[in-house]
């Protein structure tokens, strides 16, 4: 029995009529960049999150660049962020000419440790970027109290933001995923939202009059139309993911795995356990036709393009050796969860 981390073919099969109709509608319109589908999707996502402004962009990575640029991050600035995230979190900071300053994580939540983050504040700190890793909301209050602007990287946490400036990704395997790349910035401040809209289209307003040097960060109409077809199901899918975590808790209770804490501030993009002999377990599960993944095998400060030292951020460095994501997507059936748990039991000789 095959168990994959995401089953986009099953998701498409269940929504085929709606998605096909959306795609054909856009193709027949002859208008493929931005347009009414993008504007409507912005309104829908803004309403979902209770924020005034949603600005659709080309990816979650571009959403981070646009949000950071809009609050003035640039050369000479420092931006504090977690070392335990997807590369784009830090890459977007560096691409603006600023320096990512990496902080360690909380060993229970895998999210930015506020104590470690606050210890790294200097007069050059321009922003703090916590990540809601795996879908669990980071502890924002101590960061907000500093008065330094906070940009929430909620790429993995659709529906789970708290503050005035956050970014989303609609990468295909996300809880709400496009059929390609797409992202969004959520902003409470109208001026910040306006700057992002300007930045998204080469800084032009009107056409051919360029006030700032932005880029082409626009969302394709097709992606917006496909996302709109999926959007009414996102809370149902998240509820199914959460239900799968409860099932795993029961099925995996007698294994040596350390299971992730249950939390109401979690949308369960990933179900990540800690395991001794993690790589051997992953290999064994692959042999049982079960797909797993390590998010992330190398903390960002140890990436070749950054200059951190081994041992500097020990909690994240240890997590990188122990974490393993098990499949929890919404199209799984119970037999598949049972197969995952039985295979893990077999690995540990239970
Ligand atoms: C935490 C985090 N930040 C940023 C991104 C970048 O999003 P995208 O792949 O849409 O550019 C991702 C996506 O994978 C992510 O997981």
Image (tube, grey):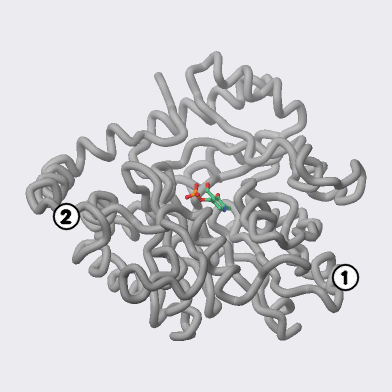
Residue 97: x %, y % from top left: 70, 60
According to the image, label 2 marks what residue? Answer: 31
The answer to whether one can see residue 277 in this image is yes
Q: Is residue 176 shown left or right of residue 248? A: left
| Identity of the residue drawn at 12% across and 51% down | 30
Q: Nearer the viewer, residue 233 or 86?
A: 86
| Residue 156 appears in the rendering | no
The number of numbered badges drawn on the structure is 2
Q: Is mark 1 within 8 Å of ligand 1?
A: no
Whether pointer 1 and pointer 2 mark residues with C-beta atoms closer than 8 Å, the reply is no
Please identify the quarter of the rendering in which residue 49 is found: bottom left
Measuring from the top left, give residue 178's x and y in whole percent.
33, 47
In the image, is residue 134 above or below residue 343?
below
Q: Is residue 337 left or right of residue 321?
A: left
Q: What residue sits 70% from the left and 20% below the top?
A: 280
Q: Nearer the viewer, residue 72 or 156?
A: 72
Q: Nearer the viewer, mark 1 or mark 2?
A: 2
In three-dimensional space, the C-alpha distance between marks 1 and 2, rounded to whole angstroms, equals 50 Å
Q: Secondary structure beneath disc 2?
A: loop
Tell me the number on the disc at residue 63: none
Q: Position of residue 34 (x, y in %)?
A: 27, 61
Give SS at disc 1. Answer: loop
- Residue 168 position within the rendered picture, expressed as x and y whole percent measured from the top left: 47, 60
Dot 1 corresponds to which residue?
119
First reached walking from the N terminus: tag 1 or tag 2? 2
Residue located 66% across and 64% down the image: 130
In the picture, the quarter occupied by the N terminus is top left
Classify the position of the C terminus by image quarter.
top right
Label 1 packing within 10 angstroms: few (<14), some (14-19), many (20+): few
Q: With respect to residue 158, does 207 lie above or below?
A: below
* 10 Å crowding of disc 2: few (<14), some (14-19), many (20+): few
User: 229 or 262: nearer the eye?
Assistant: 229
């Amino acid at each position: 029995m095959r168990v994959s981390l995401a089953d986009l073919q099953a998701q498409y099969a269940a929504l085929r009529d709606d998605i096909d109709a959306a795609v054909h509608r856009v193709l027949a319109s002859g208008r493929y960049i931005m347009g009414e589908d993008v504007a409507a999707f912005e309104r829908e996502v803004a309403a979902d999150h209770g924020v005034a402004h949603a600005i659709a962009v080309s990816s979650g990575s571009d959403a981070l660049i646009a949000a950071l640029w809009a609050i003035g991050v640039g050369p000479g600035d420092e931006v504090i962020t977690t070392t335990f995230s997807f590369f784009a979190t830090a890459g977007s900071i560096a691409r603006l000419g600023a320096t990512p300053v990496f902080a360690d994580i909380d060993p229970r939540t895998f999210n930015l440790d506020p104590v470690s983050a606050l210890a790294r504040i200097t007069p050059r700190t321009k922003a703090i970027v916590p990540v809601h890793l795996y879908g669990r909301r980071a502890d924002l209050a101590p960061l907000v109290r500093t008065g330094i602007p906070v940009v929430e990287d909620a790429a993995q946490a659709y529906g789970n933001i708290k503050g005035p400036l956050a970014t989303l990704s609609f990468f295909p395997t996300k809880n709400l995923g496009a059929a390609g790349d797409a992202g969004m910035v959520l902003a409470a401040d109208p001026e910040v939202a306006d700057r992002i809209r300007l930045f998204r289209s080469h800084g032009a307003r009107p056409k051919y009059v360029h006030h700032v040097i932005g880029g082409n960060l626009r969302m394709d109409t097709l992606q917006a139309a496909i996302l709109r077809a999926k959007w009414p199901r996102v809370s149902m899918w998240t509820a199914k993911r959460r239900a799968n975590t409860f099932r795993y808790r029961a099925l995996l209770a007698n294994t040596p795995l350390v299971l992730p804490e249950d939390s109401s501030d979690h949308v369960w993009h990933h179900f990540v356990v800690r395991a001794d002999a993690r790589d051997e377990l992953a290999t064994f599960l692959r042999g049982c036709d079960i797909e797993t993944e390590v998010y992330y095998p190398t903390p960002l400060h140890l990436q070749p393009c950054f200059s951190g030292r081994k041992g500097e951020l020990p909690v994240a460095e240890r997590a990188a050796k122990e974490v393993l994501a098990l499949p929890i997507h919404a199209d799984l059936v119970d037999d598949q969860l049972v197969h995952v748990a039985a295979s893990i039991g077999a690995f540990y000789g239970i």
